[in-house]
Amino acid sequence: MSYKPYKVPKNNNIYSRGNRQGRNNRQNSLKDDRIKLFGFRSGVSYKMILAILYYGFMAFYIITGIYGEIKYYTFEPMDVVLFVIKYIFFFILFFSPAIFLSDFKYRDSIPLFKRRTAGASITGLIIIWMFCYLMVNINIYCMSDTWKKSRDDYNRYLIEQREKTTQSGDVNEK
């Protein structure tokens, strides 16, 4: 006689992927296998539009930040490593709803997100946002003096250009 760790219910195949009646239809198997990204889980169109706009804007923000920093700032070798780490934390910060609130399998092993309640999820997101913001600021603090000087020079240049535009706009109004 073989050992059975649990009792199998009568007339039920524990290995079938179907509904409670044991039917294995295509609709049920598709629902079980899909990864549901946050904003696309319910299939409601207005939520999907908002999610597309959010994810698109955040991707645009990160890409333009990377491009602007590479184009206008001066880097030393260690700054490149810190630059990459900083944008990894920016990615986690901005895409944390997609990473932590989607129906991925790892969500059930993360303490605040496995409950799937609004309060616990919001608390978890706030903790993640605070941690990522802290790490980004630590990376900025650790950047070299060359990078900090190029950042300050570029900020001064932008302020001068803004003042010139404001002064030329005042002249045109008179």
Image: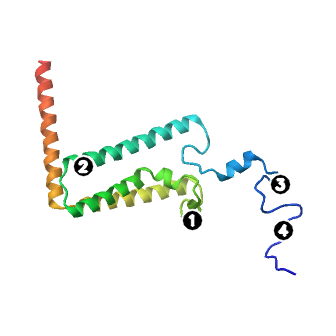
Q: What residue sits 19% from the left and 47% below the top?
A: 72
Label 2 is placed on what type of residue? Answer: Glu
At mark 2, the secondary structure is helix
- Residue beneath label 2, please? 69
The image shows residue 170 at horizontal and vertical percentages of 13, 24
Label 3 environment density (alpha carbons within 10 Å; few <14, some 14–19, many ≥20): some
**Label 3, on which residue?**
22
Q: Which of marks 3 and 1 is in front?
A: 3
Which kind of residue does numbered mark 1 sit on?
Answer: Ser
Q: Quadrant of the C terminus?
A: top left
Q: Which residue is drawn at 17% across and 53% down?
A: 74
On the image, numbered disc 4 is attached to which residue? 8
Vertical side of 95 occupied by 173: above or below:
above
**Residue 99 x %, y %:** 49, 54
Find out whether the residues at labels 4 and 3 contact each other: C-beta distance under 8 Å: no
Residue drawn at x 13%, y 42% as measured from the top left: 157
Element type at marker 1? helix
The percent position of residue 11, horizontal first and vertical second, equals 89, 61
Q: Is mark 4 on a helix, strand or loop?
A: loop
- Furthest toward the top, the residue is 174
Q: Residue 109 carries which label?
A: 1
Q: How crowded is mark 4: few (under 14 residues within 10 Å), some or many (20 or more)?
A: few
Which-is-in-front pick, marks 1 and 2? Answer: 2
Instruction: Say whether disc 4 or disc 2 marks the residue closer to the N-terminus.
Output: 4
Identify the coloring: rainbow
Q: Earlier in the sequence, mark 1 or mark 4?
A: 4
Q: Quadrant of residue 160?
A: top left
Q: Distance between the residues labelled 3 and 1?
A: 29 Å
Q: Is mark 3 on a helix, strand or loop?
A: loop
Q: In whole angstroms, how far apart are the C-alphas of marks 1 and 4?
A: 27 Å
Which is nearer the N-term, disc 4 or disc 3?
4
Q: Quadrant of residue 44?
A: top right
